[in-house]
Image: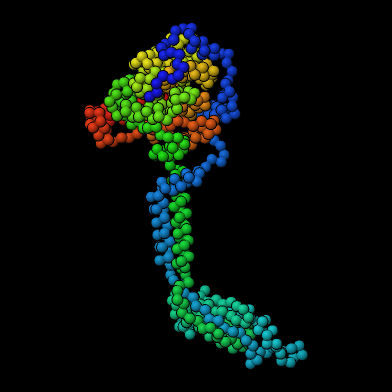
Amino acid sequence: MAGARPGRSGAFHRPQQGEELTADVHAFSDERPDAAASHPKTREAGRMAATGHPTKRKGDGMSFHEIIAVIRKRWVAELVVFAVVLAAVAGYIATRQPSYSSSSRVFISFSADGASGDTDADGTPATYEPSDYVEQHLDLIPELVTTPAVLGGVADRLGVSEASLDGKLSAYVSSGYFVVVTAHADSPAGAADLADAAVASLGEQLASAGENGSSIYVPDHLRLTVVDEAKEPSGAESPNVKALTCVGLLGAFAAAFFAALALELSDMKIRDADEIQQLLHCSVLGSLPKSSKYSSQCPVIVRRPDSMEAESVRRVASNLTFMTPDRESLSNVFVISSYGSGEGKTTMSIELAAAFAEHGDRVLFIGADLRHPSVARRLGLDEHVGLSHLLTGQAGAAEAVKVYWRPTLHVLPAGRRVANPGIIVNSNAMKALIEKASGEYDRVVIDAEPLAVGNDAVMFAKRGARLIIMAGQDQVTKPHLRDLSREFAAVGVTPVGVVRNFMDIGHPERKYYGRYYIGTDDMPDGDAGDDRAKDD
């Protein structure tokens, strides 16, 4: 860990009443808000303290890289949905009755052999221009194909009922004087036979005079000639296997994609470190196991220094040392907070301060959660005098600062609970205290209030302190972290990292750690993890 910072004026061992520290911070009532507090983005952050929730902005959504990450993450569900959709399409194709179609093309011409009784106005037999006559009556041919007269002839030829032919015949006029008659059947041969029978029956009706049974006029000067006979089709008209397969593939891909998005958006739980890094854009510093050893008033670093729980804290402390520069303003000040209460931020603050002190650093631990003071109670210290008294000039540093465990570990508890702690914590007096402590101590650890309650931790980070977020397993959710991410972006703050808390660690891992690394099997009191302290 880092050594003494340049320019340190002393060890800050319980300054006496009237010394420089007290003079710097007691003039609380004459202060004006600092520049950071009056910044527009900071004012937006302040809304979270008033409402209890971070400000939401329009336009927030998943980026392209986040969507790709979701697709990769939910591949099992996507594969299942993809297979189900394809199976449904395959089942639809398999259960559909194949339908075949065959067409015959005929040429319509004029015939003078008609026996029509048409006459001109003077009573003489009517005369026709062949081309005009065909053009005038050509559109009647498709209608004749579906009349009972034609269908009856088809039924007689094929030996079927007329009702069974309903919807199976159609016709249309193509180019010139050509008409195409199309038949639909359940087999290729049946479709060709039906088309041929329809053409033959239509020809008989055109050769007859008068009207057919459905009272539709039949021109008797038209004749048809078969140009293309109906042929057996090589494949079914429906279902269209190729088209349905293409549609099924596209639908399966789309369904799998939207299923992955739906699962991701509906899944509120944080399941791995990658999700935290993706949401908050910072590293995961480490994880603390779910363990009752953290619930004691005495830090596990002090009480059980050889335990896996203590080593988990040391890992976080080491990572912070490597990740934070040593020459920037307030780079040795660490603010611990969380989205909500009960995620272990106070426990982590106490353990982290003890870990730094164990390494030999001069450490000042400040309990800045004035809404829910708990540091003094957790450490068995006097809670009647603390930070609130020091900042308001009601007490000096000699009274407020306590020595704990080692001479290099000083604790400044919160003191009394106050109604509006934001005014005190965000004051110039607090700023002066932090700046002075940063110069006189190797490490300053601040236990701040939850971010869902107030934005004190954000204000500390805005001034240069390193913000650490505690993420309680099964407590903090993705919407919570998204809210924090939006808040940090609005204020211009990036956390130095996240510590995951209440992580489940199985018996084999505990046994392996204790037996091979520590030399003691401390299983008995490491299993009662459910009663782990959840102080703020």
Q: Residue at x 45, y 55 (%)?
A: 253
Residue that sits furthest to the front in the current view: 6
**Residue positioned 29% across, 29% down in the render:** 308
The residue located at (70%, 87%) in the rendering is 129
> In the picture shown, does residue 66 fall above or below 98?
above
* Residue 203 horizontal/vertical position (percent): 56, 86
Q: Quadrant of residue 130?
A: bottom right
- Residue 381 lies, in percent from the top left, at 38, 14
Would you identify the image quadrant in which residue 43 lies?
top right
Residue lying at the far right in this picture: please name it.
122
Q: Quadrant of residue 348?
A: top left
Q: Position of residue 217 (x, y in %)?
A: 63, 82
The colour style of the image is rainbow
Foreground: 461 or 62?
461
Q: Nearer the viewer, residue 193 or 424?
A: 424
Q: Position of residue 233 (x, y in %)?
A: 46, 77
Quadrant into which the C terminus falls: top left
Q: Is residue 358 left or right of residue 233?
A: left
Which of the two residues, 122 or 127, is positioned nearer the viewer here? 127
Q: Is residue 41 above or below residue 212?
A: above
Apparent side of residue 227 relative to residue 273 in the rendered image (left or right): right
Q: For residue 150, say whether it is visible.
A: no
Q: Quadrant of the N terminus?
A: top left
